[in-house]
Amino acid sequence: MKNFITQFSRIFVGILFIISGLIKLNDPIGFSFKLEEYFSEPVLNLPFLEPLALAIAVFMVIFEVVLGVMLLIGFQRKFTIWSLLLMILFFTFLTFYSAYFNKVTDCGCFGDALKLTPWESFTKDIVLLFFILILFFNQKFINPLFKNKINAGIAITSLVLCGFMAYWVLNHLPLKDFRAYKVGTNIEEGMAFPPDAEQAVVEMIFIYDVNGEKKEFSANELTNLPEGAKFIDRKDNVISAGYVPPIHDFTMEKDGVDHTTEFLKEPKLMLFVTYNLEIADVNGLQKLEKLHQEAVKKGYKVIGLSASNESIINKVKSDYNFTFDYYFTDATTLKTIERANPSIVILENGTITQKVHHNDIDQLKL
């Protein structure tokens, strides 16, 4: 019986680690954004790790996949199980911290393929911890599937293949796009609220100064305020978030004017998505003006989208002789649209028809 439970745990944990790792390896930049969120001051307050987020993300997801493979084939049993245990303890702490203090709303455990709430993520890690502890206390039942050299060869091959996959997606685009802005998506439809959508429930809390002390009152209590109470502030407590459309916070603004509706009706619209111009790839920026000119000749309206401020935009336009305009879009939204900085997105009447990394401009079909 112990052997059966151990082998089931071995298969369950190994496959789950491989699947979880491969999903994140498909989009390591997206996972690095999630790590940056964890490292930020409001969460773990480790800002010195933020510049290393991408390197840490790539290492972690490759290690996750390789550990899953090593567990399945029974290679380096003690190292594998100890590594799995330490990793799941670390992730269990992170997900509990996020859930209890409501710091990070999505752990990124399965990338954009499967969104989990903080408490769902914590529950998932508790289940995994349970099965890994079974493996830890029953290591004698975990035997190699093949001879040592064959097992070593399989482990090394998985490491090499993961390394190649990481290199490919970092220099091109994710092999599978799980995001809300994948090719074929109509942005206006993605922003729409269904007629029967659940509405958000928000409780307004009013803060008053009562004899030098701050006190909170609900809307129903305002009719019985203490004498001399002075209004200070108001805050909103979200009781139920309600329906959130797949696409939200998408705008294309310039000089305080929102051009989103106008541009989404363009039959041919080319977007240069650059969430941060200060750290944008130089080689990618150098290709944009030439592509702009080619696209205009073929009837495209071409604009840039960035969250950078006006002074940085003007400097970049001057440095690279850009003759197209930049419009403001929230940085998080731009990072969701595409990971490359810059990348090229083609819209036809608001529907995304093409997306390419700046390394793959020659693949665009205009």
Image (cartoon, rainbow, N blue to C red):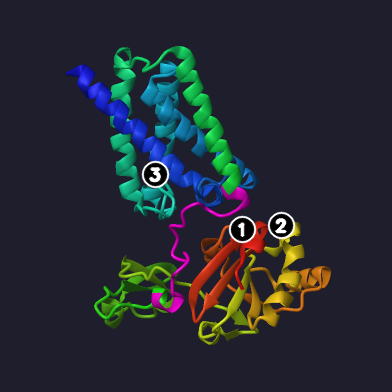
Q: Which quarter of the rendered picture does the N terminus lie within? A: top left
Instruction: Pick the residue in front: 303 or 329.
Output: 303
Whole-percent x, y for residue 114 in the image:
36, 53
Residue type indicated by callout 2: Asp
Q: Which residues are magenta?
A: 169-189
Q: Earlier in the sequence, mark 1 or mark 3?
A: 3
Asked whether the residues under the numbered discs 2 and 3 touch, taking CB atoms below 8 Å apart as contact, a structural biologist would say: no
Task: Indicate the secondary structure of the residue bearing disc 2.
Answer: loop
Residue at numbered disc 3:
95
Residue at numbered disc 1:
340
Q: Please name which of the two marks, 1 or 3, marks the residue nearer to the observer.
A: 1
Whether residue 308 sits left or right of residue 166 in the image: it is: right
Task: Indicate the secondary structure of the residue bearing disc 3.
Answer: helix
Whole-percent x, y for residue 365 in the image:
60, 69
Can residue 59 be seen at all in this image of the molecule?
Answer: no
Residue 237 tag number: none
Q: Quadrant of residue 262?
A: bottom right
Residue at numbered disc 2:
281
156 within the magenta span: no
